[in-house]
Image (cartoon, rainbow, N blue to C red):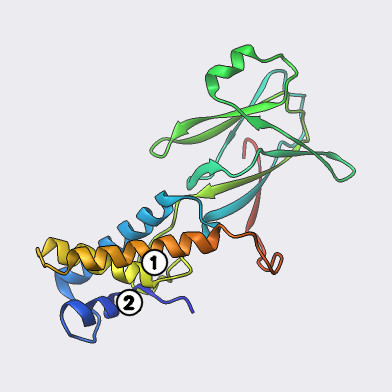
């Protein structure tokens, strides 16, 4: 069962202070930041399905795009999981392979491809070549984690014991506690195990409904 940040920090406090309560004052602020760092550290390890997201973009009416169509990507976009797909009718899809921006100069005018411009600070834009009006794009991407904004936020990872151990490690390291290396190794072992489980081919089929957002270019 997914637990809240409050419950996670309570576990940390039980270990580092032998106090089975939620930390207060500076500790709760600093340790909450440590928890967010732990989530980012896990997400940097590789793609986790918890951070997968699907977006549907409809180009709407109007003339056919003569050359390129630019689509603003969601603010939490990190990278495409697969090539974006365009619905060409009758349940048929055609992929727009992602290329590096500089590769576009070697492509033909009618080639179907896309590239991404931007950065996390300014935001990302996907540029599609030869995208017709009234096209519907399906884009599956990996998002940045939301993290913990409040003590009632639930851990996004499927094993929150990693967050517990990683926060313990950060606290002990800051205090120059000799237990730091042992706890850090335990956190890394849990992270490796969790990543290994995520990398397995699903055995029970799809049992989650993806979150899909629809918007129109220019709105």
Residue 26 appearing in the image: yes
Q: Which mark is residue 200?
A: none
**Outermost residue toward the right in this view:** 90
Please state the horizontal and vertical placement of residue 181, each as a whole percent of the image: 20, 63
Task: Say which element carries label 1.
Answer: helix
**Looking at the image, residue 7 lies above or below residue 155:** below
In-image side of 66 versus 71 (left or right) = right
Q: Decide which of 42, 119 is in the foreground and name it.
A: 42
The structure residue drawn at horizontal position 36% and vertical position 64%, both measured from the top left corner, is: 189
The structure residue drawn at horizontal position 62% and vertical position 35%, both measured from the top left corner, is: 218
Q: Decide which of 11, 45 is in the foreground and name it.
A: 45
Q: Decide which of 214, 55 is in the foreground and name it.
A: 55
Please state the horizontal and vertical placement of residue 64, each as a whole percent of the image: 77, 24
The structure residue drawn at horizontal position 59% and vertical position 53%, both measured from the top left corner, is: 53
Q: How many marks?
A: 2
In-image side of 159 versus 201 (left or right) = left
On the image, numbered disc 2 is attached to which residue?
A: 6
In the image, which is nearer the foreground, mark 1 or mark 2?
A: 1
On the image, numbered disc 1 is attached to which residue?
A: 190
The C terminus sits in image quarter? top right
CA–CA distance in space, label 1 to label 2: 20 Å
Neighbour tally class for label 2: few under 14, some 14-19, many 20 plus, Cα within 10 Å: many
In-image side of 74 versus 153 (left or right) = right
In-image side of 26 versus 163 (left or right) = left
**Looking at the image, residue 193 lies above or below residue 120:** below
Please state the horizontal and vertical placement of residue 87, each as a whole percent of the image: 79, 40
Q: Decide which of 151, 200 is in the foreground and name it.
A: 200
The structure residue drawn at horizontal position 87% and vertical position 40%, both measured from the top left corner, is: 89
């Amino acid at each position: 069962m997914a637990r809240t940040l409050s419950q996670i920090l309570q576990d940390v406090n039980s270990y580092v202070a032998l106090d089975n309560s939620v930390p207060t004052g500076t500790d709760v602020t600093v340790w909450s930041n440590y928890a967010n760092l732990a989530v980012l550290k896990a997400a940097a390890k590789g793609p986790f399905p918890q951070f997968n997201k699907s977006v549907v973009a409809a180009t709407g009416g109007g003339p056919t795009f003569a050359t390129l169509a630019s689509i603003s990507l969601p603010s939490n976009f990190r990278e495409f999981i697969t090539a974006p797909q365009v619905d060409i009718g009758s349940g048929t899809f055609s992929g727009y392979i992602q290329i590096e921006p500089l590769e576009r100069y070697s492509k033909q005018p009618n080639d179907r491809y896309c590239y991404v411009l931007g950065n996390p600070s300014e935001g990302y834009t996907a540029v599609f070549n030869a995208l017709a009006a009234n096209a519907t794009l399906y884009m599956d991407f990996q998002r940045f984690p939301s993290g913990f904004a409040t003590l009632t936020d639930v851990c996004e990872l499927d094993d929150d014991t990693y967050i517990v151990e990683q926060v313990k490690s950060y606290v002990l390291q800051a205090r120059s506690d000799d237990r730091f290396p042992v706890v850090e190794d335990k956190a890394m072992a849990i992270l490796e195990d969790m990543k290994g489980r995520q990398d397995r081919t699903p055995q029970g089929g799809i049992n989650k409904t993806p979150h899909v957002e629809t918007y129109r270019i220019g709105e």
